[in-house]
Image (spheres, grey):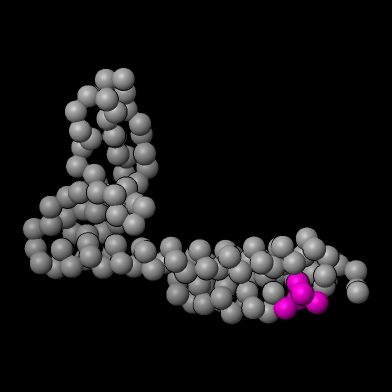
Amino acid sequence: MPGHCLRLWSSSLTRVGVMRRTRVFRQFGSGSPPALVWHLNLVIEERMANTASARKRIRQTVTRTARNQARKSRMRTFVKKVETAIASGDKSVAAGALRDAQPEMQRASGKGVIHANTVARKLSRLSARIKALPSA
């Protein structure tokens, strides 16, 4: 389909290397898409960095984004383990899974990956669900 475009929201790297949300249009069919880089499952609009410091900021941003995604994914995995234990109905297993998940969630909060209040809310809701389980 020549001329058909798909609008994607993505993070683009500007000349100063600061992350900013922008629209990227990828053309399907005729010709090649605009300058896009597929790195670490991110769609990043490619821009030329004029200074060495800007190039370094771009490298740092890509590295930090990957690290933060890994931290968030690890935290979600621990939360899923707690939710699976709650669904099984075993209170002691669920409590142990929450004890394992809590430091991981606090670590993500301390590193600035997610907000501290989000962690507090999630922990509170998980512990309330565990408390509501019948004792074995």
Tell me the quadrant of the picture where the C terminus can be found.
bottom right
Residue drawn at x 61%, y 69% as measured from the top left: 78
Q: In this view, does 127 lie to the left or right of 120?
A: right
- Residue 111 visible in the current orientation: yes
Query: Which residues are the magenta region?
Result: 92-96
- x and y percentages locating residue 19 in the rendered image: 30, 56
Residue drawn at x 71%, y 63% as measured from the top left: 83
- Residue 125 visible in the current orientation: no
- x and y percentages locating residue 98 in the rendered image: 69, 74
Q: Which of 135 and 24 is in front in this view?
A: 135
Tell me the quadrant of the picture where the N terminus can be found.
top left
- x and y percentages locating residue 18 in the rendered image: 26, 59
Which SS type dominates the magenta stretch?
A: helix
Residue drawn at x 34%, y 67% as measured from the top left: 64
Residue 82, placed above or below residue 20: below
Q: Which of 123 and 59 is in front in this view?
A: 59
Residue 43, placed above or below residue 105: above
Q: Quadrant of residue 130?
A: bottom right
Q: Is residue 125 magenta?
A: no
Residue drawn at x 29%, y 54% as measured from the top left: 39
Q: In which quarter of the image is residue 22?
A: top left
- x and y percentages locating residue 29 in the rendered image: 27, 25
Residue 42, placed above or below residue 8: below
